[in-house]
């Protein structure tokens, strides 16, 4: 079983795009810290949330929002523009939870509870 569960504050607002078959994908990035002191490392995890579930939480996924994410982890290699090999850490999200107010300020919009999100979103 490949399940990766983590929490963190969004690094920027989530973005929505559409693939050629018309399916929607919402992407956002969350930093995950590991290690201690001067050995601490921060890895950015790219999160992909497909379909209506992504569309329904898109308005709430703003920079600084604390989220809990669970899904299937994948580490993918690719070549950048200069030809160097890079690694992308990605999660195909199966569950996202809004865990409080955004860091650094109050929210203008009312935020649904986790129960409201899971009741409204078909799996």
Image (cartoon, rainbow, N blue to C red):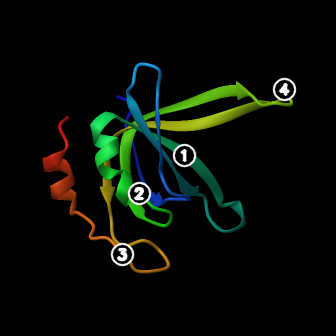
What residue would you read off at disc 1? 45
Residue at 66% over, 27% down: 77
| Label 4 SS | loop
Marking on residue 108 = 3
Q: Mark 1 packing: few (<14 Cα in 10 Å), some, or many (20+)?
A: many
Residue at 33% over, 70% down: 100
Q: Is residue 77 left or right of residue 69?
A: right
Q: Nearer the viewer, mark 3 or mark 1?
A: 3
Q: Nearer the viewer, mark 4 or mark 2?
A: 2
What residue would you read off at disc 2? 61
Residue at 37% over, 36% down: 3
| Label 3 SS | loop
Q: Determine whether 93 is above or below 66 in the image.
A: above
Going by the picture, which residue comes out furthest to the right? 82
- Looking at the image, is mark 3 or mark 2 earlier in the sequence? 2
Residue at 62% over, 36% down: 88
- Looking at the image, is mark 1 or mark 2 earlier in the sequence? 1
How far apart marks 3 and 4 lie (CA) works out to 43 Å
How far apart marks 3 and 1 lie (CA) works out to 27 Å
Q: Quadrant of the N terminus?
A: top left
Number of marks present in the image shown: 4
Marking on residue 83 = 4
User: Is the C-beta separation of discs 3 and 4 under 8 Å?
Assistant: no
Q: Mark 3 packing: few (<14 Cα in 10 Å), some, or many (20+)?
A: few
User: Is the C-beta separation of discs 3 and 1 under 8 Å?
Assistant: no
Going by the picture, which residue comes out furthest to the top? 21
How far apart marks 4 and 2 lie (CA) works out to 33 Å
| Label 2 SS | loop
Across and down, in percent, residue 82 comes to 86, 30
- Looking at the image, is mark 3 or mark 1 earlier in the sequence? 1
- Looking at the image, is mark 1 or mark 4 earlier in the sequence? 1
How far apart marks 1 and 4 lie (CA) works out to 22 Å
């Amino acid at each position: 079983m490949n399940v990766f569960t983590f929490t963190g504050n969004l690094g920027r607002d989530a973005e929505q795009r559409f693939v050629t078959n018309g399916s929607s994908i919402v992407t956002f990035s969350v930093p995950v810290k590991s290690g201690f002191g001067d050995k601490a490392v921060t890895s950015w995890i790219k999160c992909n949330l497909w379909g209506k579930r992504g569309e329904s939480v898109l308005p709430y996924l703003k920079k600084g929002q604390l989220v809990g994410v669970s899904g299937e982890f994948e580490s993918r290699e690719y070549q950048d523009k200069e030809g160097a090999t890079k690694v992308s850490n990605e999660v195909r999200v199966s569950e996202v939870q809004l865990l409080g107010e955004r860091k650094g300020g109050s929210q203008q919009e009312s935020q649904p509870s986790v129960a409201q999100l899971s009741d409204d979103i078909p799996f």
